[in-house]
Amino acid sequence: MSSSTPKASDRIVDVRFDEDRLVVDFVDGRTLAVPLAWFPVLLHATPEARAKWELSAAGYGIHWPLLDEDLSAAGLLQGLPSVQRRPLAA
């Protein structure tokens, strides 16, 4: 039986990007790197817009206010890419 209650260890503490990956650090010391191509809005955003992220949902999510993009810790940990196929029109 799976639980929908998030674990305290799944809280995000930092977010950064390298050339082709989104890198997320968790409170328990884990680091997860996923292909930026999984998230077209982030892939096509400027580095400045990507850098303006904030934690949401008590650290269980990431929100980019300039991009109207949200990712959850649970989705990242499950390896779920964005369902959006292409970036929003400007």
Image: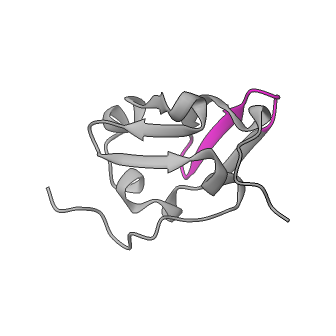
From which residue to which does the magenta span run?
A: 18-30
Tell me how many marks there are: 0
Identify which residue is drawn at 56% across, 48% down: 72
Residue 18 to residue 54: above or below: below
Residue 87 to residue 32: above or below: below
Is 53 situated left or right of 60 in this image?
left
- Towards the viewer: 57 or 67: 57
- Towards the viewer: 45 or 72: 72
Q: Residue furthest right?
A: 1
Question: Residue 51, position in %: x, y?
Answer: 41, 31
Q: Residue furthest left?
A: 90
74 falls in the magenta region: no
- The quadrant where residue 64 appears: top left
Question: Residue 11, position in %: x, y?
Answer: 68, 33
- The quadrant where residue 80 appears: bottom right
Question: Residue 44, position in %: x, y?
Answer: 34, 55
Is 49 situated left or right of 14 in this image?
left
Is 9 situated left or right of 16 in this image?
right
Viewport quadrant of the N terminus: bottom right
Residue 72 to residue 50: above or below: below
Q: Residue furthest bottom?
A: 85
Q: Is residue 20 visible?
A: yes
Identify which residue is drawn at 41% across, 55% down: 43
Q: Is residue 34 visible?
A: no
Viewport quadrant of the C terminus: bottom left
